[in-house]
């Protein structure tokens, strides 16, 4: 009979509180080799009769730390062999895969792990995967979300149970894990990257958490309570958002724009988030969500939310589409919104402001300094059909002061712009007539020599 500990008691309480093992007979423990996952594995293995479960283990070698990654895999293999626990190992080059998928290494690693756990669970009846997230991990996640300006969802932290994944240690502190390892005489490995504050999460763990403990020694437990309250509120909002989303569905992955616009601004955002999750399995980033809400309100446009995944608004429909890299109907960085005075928007890492209408006689400026006119467009040529967008096939441009009309494609080629710059540079246009190109200037017909004009300015967003 294993010696009882704080971790043991808290883990049993979490399993009971969140009904983690309801209908579950096999648990696959995710084991990295660190103290948290070794404690989880040992707890499940030593309590399997009490819990009425079969225990297996899974390890993912991300191949991101060279010899240290191989050391971790070997350690987990040896431990599982000693305990007689069946083990499945996935060996993958996460760095290369992240580039292939066009996402960050950390996000890719997480995706790979959960895909692997899902595949393993599908092989067994009544199976769940268990990860070793603790209350300390949860507090760090919430803090990290807060530093990024999260909404209510971000305060929910790490869910104790969701979609076939359970977290029995979610009520345990890191100190509980350390005590458990000492009490049980458990060996574990240490990820050397956790000891440096090069990463945001590590800086929070090493520098911020100790300061918070001086204010409230139980701040992690307090954060867990806050997360429970936030999850309860999000559950209510989520149910309402799903009702609205279902009512707005006209086809698979297609919503009625009118129905979505009938929601409040806050609820509209939740409806879009639920559909992004439903269509792509994505947790929407705020920058993408803001752009999507903009094109929904404007009535047309498209936003690429991930490589080969976009949200497009057209003809009263909001379409959540996946497309291949060879899709000729949609350039990789397609963007389009109506040009209106006083709006602001974000695109490709930059923040853009369109001024209110300005009435100035620019005749002298034309003679003195043409640079003053480069981002100014005459209001006389702007209509409800004028768009700010990326280039399209057939676009033509007559640059102010040059008097020569040419295709935008030819102009970009003559300027020797890099391919990515050609695809992401913004312009303003009436149909295929381009009125303004970012960094190049306005057309003859749009030049603000006198009268009312608007000015478009973009700046790189600070990280």
Image (spheres, rainbow, N blue to C red):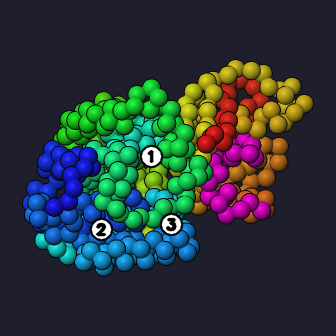
Mark closer to the observer (1, 2)? 2
Q: CA distance from mark 1 to mark 3?
A: 18 Å
Residue 205 visible at all: yes
**Residue assigned mark 3:** 98
Tag 2 secondary structure: helix
The residue drawn where x is 13% and y is 71% is: 125
**Residue assigned mark 1:** 285
| 33 relative position to 354: left or right | left
The residue drawn where x is 66% and y is 35% is: 456
Q: CA distance from mark 2 to mark 3?
A: 18 Å
Q: Earlier in the sequence, mark 1 or mark 3?
A: 3
Q: Which residues are magenta?
A: 416-442
| 240 relative position to 273: left or right | left
Q: Is residue 33 magenta?
A: no
Q: Residues within 10 Å of mark 2 (few under 14, many from 20)?
A: many
- Locate residue 1, reporting x and y percent: 16, 61
Q: Residues within 10 Å of mark 1 (few under 14, many from 20)?
A: few
**Residue assigned mark 2:** 117
- Locate residue 196, reporting x and y percent: 59, 52
């Amino acid at each position: 009979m294993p010696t009882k500990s704080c971790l043991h008691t808290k883990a049993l309480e979490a399993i009971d509180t969140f009904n983690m093992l309801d209908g579950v007979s096999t648990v696959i423990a995710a084991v990295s080799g660190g103290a948290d996952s070794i404690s989880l594995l040992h707890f499940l293995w030593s309590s399997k009769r009490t819990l009425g479960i079969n225990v297996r283990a899974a390890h993912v070698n991300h191949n991101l730390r060279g010899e240290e990654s191989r050391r971790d895999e070997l350690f987990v293999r040896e431990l599982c062999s000693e305990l007689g626990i069946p083990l499945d190992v996935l060996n993958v080059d996460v760095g290369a895969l992240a580039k292939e998928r066009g996402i960050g290494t950390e996000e890719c690693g997480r995706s790979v792990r959960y895909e692997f756990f899902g595949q393993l669970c599908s092989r067994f009846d009544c199976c769940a995967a268990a990860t070793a997230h603790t209350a300390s991990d949860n507090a760090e996640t919430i803090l990290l979300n807060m530093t990024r300006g999260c909404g209510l969802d971000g305060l929910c932290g790490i869910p104790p149970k969701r979609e076939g994944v359970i977290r029995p240690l979610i009520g345990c502190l890191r100190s509980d894990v350390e005590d458990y390892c000492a009490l049980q005489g458990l060996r574990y490995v240490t990820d050397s990257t956790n000891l440096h504050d090069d990463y945001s999460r590590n800086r929070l763990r090493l520098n911020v958490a100790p300061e918070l403990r001086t204010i409230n020694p139980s701040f992690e437990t307090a954060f867990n309570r806050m997360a429970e309250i936030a999850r309860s509120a999000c559950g209510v909002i989520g149910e309402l958002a799903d009702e609205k989303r279902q009512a707005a569905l006209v086809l698979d992955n297609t919503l009625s724009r009118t129905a979505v616009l009938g929601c409040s601004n806050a609820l509209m955002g939740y409806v879009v988030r639920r559909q992004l999750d439903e269509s792509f399995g994505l947790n929407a980033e705020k920058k993408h969500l803001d752009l999507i809400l903009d094109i929904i309100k404007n009535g047309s446009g498209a936003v690429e939310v991930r490589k080969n995944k976009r949200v497009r608004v057209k003809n009263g429909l909001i379409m959540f589409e996946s497309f291949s890299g060879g899709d000729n109907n949609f350039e990789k960085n397609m963007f389009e919104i109506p040009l209106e005075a006083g709006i602001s928007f974000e695109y490709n890492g930059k923040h853009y402001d369109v001024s209110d209408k300005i009435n100035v006689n620019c005749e002298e400026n034309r003679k003195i300094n043409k640079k003053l006119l480069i981002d100014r467009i005459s209001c006389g040529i702007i209509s409800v059909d004028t768009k700010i967008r990326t280039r399209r096939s057939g676009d033509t441009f007559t640059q102010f002061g040059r008097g020569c009309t040419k295709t935008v494609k030819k102009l970009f080629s003559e300027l020797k712009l890099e391919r990515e710059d050609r695809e992401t540079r913004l312009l303003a246009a009436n149909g295929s007539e381009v009125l303004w190109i970012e960094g190049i200037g306005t057309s003859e017909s749009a030049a603000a020599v006198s009268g009312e004009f608007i000015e478009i300015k973009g700046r790189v967003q600070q990280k």
